Image (tube, helix red, strand yellow):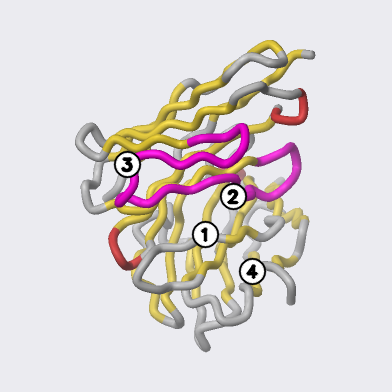
Amino acid sequence: GAGVSQSPRYKVAKRGQDVALRCDPISGHVSLFWYQQALGQGPEFLTYFQNEAQLDKSGLPSDRFFAERPEGSVSTLKIQRTQQEDSAVYLCASSLLGQMNTEAFFGQGTRLTVV
Amino acid sequence: GENVEQHPSTLSVQEGDSAVIKCTYSDSASNYFPWYKQELGKRPQLIIDIRSNVGEKKDQRIAVTLNKTAKHFSLHITETQPEDSAVYFCAASIGNNNDMRFGAGTRLTVKP
């Protein structure tokens, strides 16, 4: 595709429900990031992949959050037993990886509302 | 890990005036500093970036400066226009693993 694609765009979950958010990065992009963006705030780092390797998951707020990228392309962010504080926009970004760091391209995000 | 701080959180200027947004970072290994613009309900989009081997970069009305010694970098927008109104985020990318952290954002309002 032409850009980073995320689905669904909007998700309403009942508290306690599990959700899965999908990210299709730009083809050929090695790096993939997940961020959580609360209303009026900057993107908060969740986790980072290089190909299928999850190099940094220090931003995941609890063990209810899990991310994978099994084939080094599509990534899924899973949130188990959702809580109201999980309500936010979840942004995915991808970038090429070379000797010099390069621009990260963002998807439109998934707006998660936990009720 | 890297910590990026951004100031101010809100900024209001008159059309035609300049706007300056400042960021500091903590990890001296950071070597790439992009700035993103996010309009309401849209995804962040890159507007300018700078690498650690240069001190300043300019693109039309937008410029970014980097002080590696002090570990801070700034975004300068001249001759502001109402369409510049948005939230601006700075970021710092660490070393050669491309890990990236963002500032909390600055909401810029340009009054016509």
Point out the image quarter for the N terminus of chain A.
bottom right
Q: Amino acid at mark 2?
A: Leu
Q: Please tell me if label 3 and label 2 are on a single chain.
A: yes
Q: Residues within 10 Å of mark 2 (few under 14, many from 20)?
A: some
Q: Amino acid at mark 1?
A: Glu
Mark linked to residue A20: 4
Q: Residues within 10 Å of mark 1 (few under 14, many from 20)?
A: many
Position of residue B99 measured from the top left corner of the image (x, y, whole percent) = 38, 60
**Which one is closest to the eye, mark 1 or mark 4?**
1
Residue that mark 1 sits on: A103
A8 and B110: which is toward the camera: B110
Instruction: State which chain disc 3 sits on.
Output: B
A57 and B4: which is toward the camera: B4
Please identify the quarter of the rendering in which residue B74 is found: top left
Instruction: State which chain disc 4 sits on.
Output: A
Distance from disc 4 to disc 3, alpha carbons, whole Å, reads: 28 Å
Q: Please tell me if label 1 and label 2 are on a single chain.
A: no
Label 3 close to label 1 by CB (< 8 Å): no
Q: Amino acid at mark 4?
A: Ala
Residue at 60% across, 61% down: A105
> First in sequence: mark 1 or mark 4?
4
Residue that mark 3 sits on: B3
Position of residue B25 measured from the top left corner of the image (x, y, whole percent) = 31, 39
Residue that mark 2 sits on: B46
Distance from disc 3 to disc 2, alpha carbons, whole Å, reads: 20 Å
Instruction: State which chain disc 1 sits on.
Output: A
Distance from disc 1 to disc 4, alpha carbons, whole Å, reads: 26 Å
Q: Which residues are magenta?
A: B38-63
